[in-house]
């Protein structure tokens, strides 16, 4: 007898805001949530270091088509840095490579922190997930290999000092995509002349998602157990936690189409729209009076709406 086909999971569409715990990778957290939901397809939207906690949006099914918009979105963090010690990873998971005396006053600290505001160039850490010749930088770093990294443009919209006690500095940061908080802390330590590394990092915001919508692995596992005890399908308790697909593109301008026009767009055809936005603008596309989300599109040179990513589940 042949082997029975392995179950791949059920089709689930939506986004859940996981409050990632410390001590595990983002991919490990993703796999745990995917298994809890028994989802056929899932992906996260920007890795957090094992040390870090906080908001990790996980996209299921059709939502994975729009995950790039969350990868490209602004982020918010709360971070605690320890002055006087520099590590090879710029966080407390690494080895201390230098210890220096801390001679920092509040004025020095506030001026140094203020210098990070605005648009700057940042060289990514060797202990990042960025790839060089197909491999993550951290794989080279673990072997003691230094590879060239290009500085990247980042924007720190706001960085504020929350607390300065002894050797600890606590800050809040609102920044653009691709900003490495560990690198900011390491650079701050060098600016202050004493070195520094991250001891706590928590992502408090991604795009416009509300902090209070986050759920923990423990909460999800408890709902799974509750479903077993009540002898009901886990989806009855788990699926109400999912956020709609279009929350991934909530910052985009909306273009609403009549159902007859949407029928052409859903076949991948460019359609004419009145009062079209500027050429090149990416828009959120909805359909009909109930503003059903059908995907995202881009305005071409003729003012036509050209579909880019479409939701497969809609029928017209």
Image (cartoon, rainbow, N blue to C red):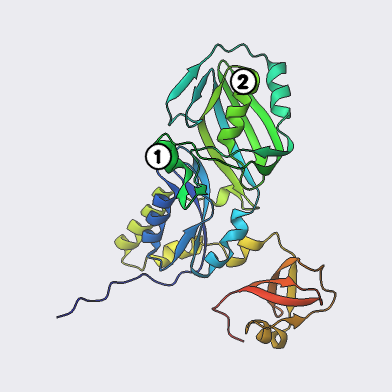
The residue that label 1 is drawn on is 23
Position of residue 286 measured from the top left corner of the image (x, y, whole percent): 69, 74
- Left-right relation of 45 to 164: left
Is residue 16 depicted above or below 63 in this figure?
A: above
Is residue 315 depicted above or below 211 in this figure?
A: below
Position of residue 315 measured from the top left corner of the image (x, y, whole percent): 58, 85
Q: Which one is nearer the viewer's eye here, 100 or 75?
A: 100
Q: Is residue 23 visible?
A: yes
Q: Quadrant of the N terminus?
A: bottom left
Position of residue 54 measured from the top left corner of the image (x, y, whole percent): 52, 44
User: What label sits on residue 164 in the rendered view?
Assistant: 2
- Left-right relation of 119 to 164: right
Q: Quadrant of the C terminus?
A: bottom right
Residue at 61% x, 22% y: name it.
190
Is residue 11 depicted above or below 230 in this figure?
A: below
Tell me the crowding category of disc 2: few under 14, some 14 to 19, or many 20 or more residues within 10 angstroms, Cα based: some
Q: Which one is nearer the viewer's eye here, 288 or 28?
A: 28
Position of residue 295 measured from the top left corner of the image (x, y, whole percent): 63, 72
Q: Give the SS element for disc 1.
A: loop
């Amino acid at each position: 007898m042949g082997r029975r086909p392995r179950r791949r999971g059920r089709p689930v569409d939506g986004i859940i805001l996981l409050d990632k715990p410390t001590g595990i990778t983002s991919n490990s957290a993703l796999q745990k949530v995917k298994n809890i939901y028994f989802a056929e397809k899932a992906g996260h939207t920007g890795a957090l270091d094992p040390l870090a906690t906080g908001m990790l949006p996980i996209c299921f099914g059709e939502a994975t088509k729009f995950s790039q918009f969350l990868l490209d979105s602004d982020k918010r963090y709360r971070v605690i840095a320890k002055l006087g010690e520099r590590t090879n990873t710029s966080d407390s998971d690494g080895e201390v490579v230098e210890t220096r005396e801390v001679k920092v006053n509040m004025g020095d600290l506030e001026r140094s922190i203020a210098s990070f505001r605005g648009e700057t160039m940042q060289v990514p850490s060797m202990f990042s997930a960025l790839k060089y010749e197909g491999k993550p930088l951290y794989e080279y770093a673990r072997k003691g290999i230094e590879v060239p990294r290009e500085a990247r443009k980042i924007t720190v919209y706001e960085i504020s000092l929350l607390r300065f006690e002894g050797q600890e500095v606590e800050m809040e940061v609102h920044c653009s995509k691709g900003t490495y908080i560990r690198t900011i802390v390491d650079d701050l330590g060098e600016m202050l002349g004493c070195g520094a590394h991250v001891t706590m990092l928590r992502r408090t915001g991604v795009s416009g998602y509300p902090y209070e919508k986050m759920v923990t692995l423990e909460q999800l596992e408890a709902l799974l157990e509750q479903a077993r005890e009540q002898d009901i399908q886990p989806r009855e308790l788990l699926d109400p936690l999912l956020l709609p697909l279009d929350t991934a593109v909530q910052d985009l301008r909306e273009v609403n189409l009549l159902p007859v026009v949407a029928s052409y767009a859903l076949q991948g055809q460019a359609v004419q729209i009145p009062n079209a936005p500027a050429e090149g603008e990416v828009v959120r596309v909805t359909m009909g009076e109930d503003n059903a989300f059908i995907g995202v599109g881009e305005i071409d040179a003729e003012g036509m709406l050209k579909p880019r990513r479409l939701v497969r589940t809609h029928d017209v």
